[in-house]
Image (tube, rainbow, N blue to C red):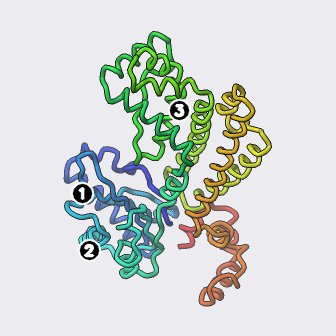
Amino acid sequence: MAFSGKKRMYSESYIKFGFTSVNKQEDIKQQVIAKIKEAPLGMFAIQLDESTDISSCAQLLAYTRYIKDSDFKEEFFFCHPLESTTTGEDIFEAVFSFFEKEGLSWANMVGCTSDGSPAMLGFRSGFRARVKEANPRASKMHCLIHRYALAVKTLPPDLKTVLDDVVAMVNLIKNSLLNTRMLRLLCQELNSEEESLLFHTEVRWLSRGNVVARVVTLKGELKDFFERNQKEKTRKFVNKLSDNKWITKLAYLNDLFSRINAVNRSLQGYSATVIDFVDELRTFQMKLKLWQEKVTAGRYNAFENMSDSLSVLCKDDVNEVSGLIHKHLVSLSYELENYFPDITDLFCQLNRNLLKVDPTSLPDELQEEFNDFVNDSTAKDSFDSLSLTRLWSTMA
């Protein structure tokens, strides 16, 4: 029942949240709570995200997953402003007050997923520590999508410099209304596919890829714009956009970020589970190994844009860029393995291939109960006929 990561801001029940009356909002909330209490054994899981909105107000967003009609259901739970500090104690007190007010028991909360802030993850004084006190049996997980975003964020200095150059170009234009208008007119004059750049936002995980992709699309127009600008601070950008080696590195970032963002998007959506994430993660890790081997062998077809750019480089530059890319791919593989030490084969088997698990690999106190379960003919039939979410909902 655990969440794999962040979900969309509101469930379908809350699509019109901002346009309903206070009474209507309260009615929707009470319907969700009533469904949770009617779930088998009253079990439910929660997911928390502490974020700061555009007015600099810290908000605690909570989502819930529970069983209804033999399947998992997901709903937006509540939003609570954190008006002063945002410590683990503050977050726990907000959740505790909500549970107490609505008559929900900590004993029925089977899992809690949170973002990676210290206030959430602290084992001694953070929210996780307080949850362990309230319900030691509840699973506690750092959001998998958040971990994935952190793992793929690191870039070697040479590639980080290219990304910094891109952000500087974008900021120079987007921070000036005149520059923005002039670029738009130039793009219209040249019949370009796009007419504007995108701002880079560090907290938005897909931002890097979108920003780089737009710069790649408009690199010719940008070079023309900076050449016409005739200012000292734009001369360095003309040099960058005229440097084939820099363009090749930019093309690699574009190709890689598009792959990374595709994985990120595939991990989100209704009823996404930890197992779905593990499948995507392992597939991506295998691709990284494959790309490393191809780059070592001088084959770059996995990176279409970069492959085209490499054709204009001299042999020494090709070797330099190739070595940089291979080093980055190896580093990326290491980061992913480092951020997911808890994704084990046993964990996956217990969720997906339960009937094939060796009972002796489990804790002693679970082995006899496990043997009874896997020899139940009804359980075997269910494994063959039901989806994972419906299977585990039925077994609850």
Q: Is residue 178 left or right of residue 217?
A: left
| Of the image marks 2 and 3, the number of the one nearer the N terminus | 2
> Furthest-right residue in view?
297
Residue 310 occupies which quadrant of the picture?
top right
Residue for point 62% across, 32% down: 245
Image coords of residue 68 (percent x, y): 46, 63
- The residue where tag 3 is placed is 213
Image coords of residue 183 (percent x, y): 40, 19
- The residue where tag 2 is placed is 100
Q: Is residue 279 left or right of residue 58?
A: right
Residue 84 occupies which quadrant of the picture?
bottom left
Answer yes or no: do the residues labelled 3 and 1 have beta carbons within 8 Å?
no
Task: Give the amino acid type for the residue marked by disc 2 in the picture.
Answer: Glu
Mark 3 or mark 1, whichever is nearer to me: 3
Task: Give the amino acid type for the residue marked by disc 1 in the picture.
Answer: Glu
Above or below, comparing residue 222 to residue 101 in the picture: above
Mark 3 residue element:
helix
- The residue where tag 1 is placed is 26
Residue 390 appears in the figure? no
Image coords of residue 253 (percent x, y): 58, 39
Above or below, comparing residue 329 to residue 226 in the picture: below
Q: Is residue 347 left or right of residue 210?
A: right
